Amino acid sequence: MATEVDICNLALAHLGDTATVASIDPPEGSAQAEHCSRFYPIARDTLLEMHPWGFATKRVQLAMLGESWSEWTYAYAVPNDAVNIIAIVTSDATDDYSEAILTNPNIPAGGAYVPQPFSCEIQDDGTQVILTDQENAVLRYTALVSDTGTFSPLFVSTLSWHLASLLAGPILKGETGAAEAKRCLQMMNVYLSQAMESDASQRRINPNQRVAWISGR
């Protein structure tokens, strides 16, 4: 299992930096540790937002807010650990796909995609809310995960290259740093594609599902 320090040292190695860090929280005192402490959370959180990773996906019953909204029927509080909102589903949904409902001719055999329309907005006081017409809404979302033990090996590799791209400028500086940042981003994209493909292959979905706009053809 890779730790935060392992990922930081891997990122430094990508840049050809022979130094290693022993702690980033708090940083041990070296320039490398200071940079890693500052950029590691940014690299991790942005990577979490790029894909609905299985290890970071959660479902929760949303807490309804008291405000009334003209456009939507219900307003819900956004969970504090939410990085990316994926879908709003009914409280009894076991996944994002319904089974065929024989009494409804608009739902084809094999099921239908059932997440409900929603909008993420912000109130005047800065509070984030989810607006939807779904009563007793359940949210599927990407959560902020800091436990590296849950990261897949491919996610770790992707994160190390992403972090390296952020560290290149402060550590190498100038044109050399800019060139290395570009190279590291290219490598990150290679690993990101592989990581997303591997993650997606571990999902159970209904292969016969049809979304509404296709069903209406």
Image: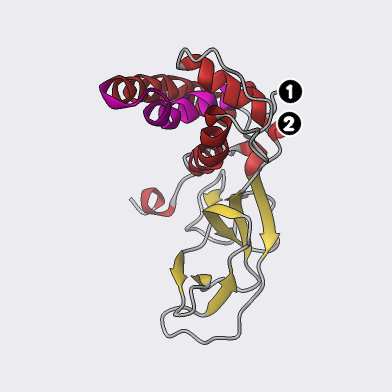
Taking the spot 53% from the left edge, 41% from the top edge, the residue there is 38
Q: Residue at the spot x=49%, y=30% of the render?
A: 163
Name the residue: 67% across, 54% down: 59
* Residue at 44% across, 69% down: 121
Q: Is 170 contained in the magenta span?
A: yes
User: Callout 2, which amino acid?
Assistant: Gly
- Residue 190 shown left or right of residue 87 in the figure: left
- Residue 85, placed above or below residue 192: below
117 with respect to 217 (left or right): right
Percent position of residue 55, x then y: 66, 37
SS of the residue at dot 1?
loop
Look at the numbered discs 2 and 1 and tell me whether their residues touch, using CB distance below 8 Å.
yes
Q: CA distance from mark 2 to mark 1?
A: 6 Å
Give me the disc on residue 149. Answer: 2
Outermost residue, left direction?
A: 175
For marks 2 and 1, the one nearer the N-term is 1
The x and y percentages for residue 106 are 47, 58
Q: Position of residue 14 (x, y in %)?
A: 48, 16
* In the rendered image, the vertical position of residue 99 relative to residue 186, given as above or below: below
Name the foreground residue: 51 vs 209.
Answer: 51
Residue pointed to by mark 1: 1
Q: Residues in magenta?
A: 155-175
Q: What secondary structure predominates along the stretch shown in magenta?
A: helix
Q: Is residue 174 magenta?
A: yes
Q: In what element is the residue under mark 2?
A: helix
Q: Is 190 rendered above or below residue 216?
A: above
Quadrant (top left/top right/bottom left/bottom right) for the N terminus = top right
| Residue 93, picture quadrant | bottom right
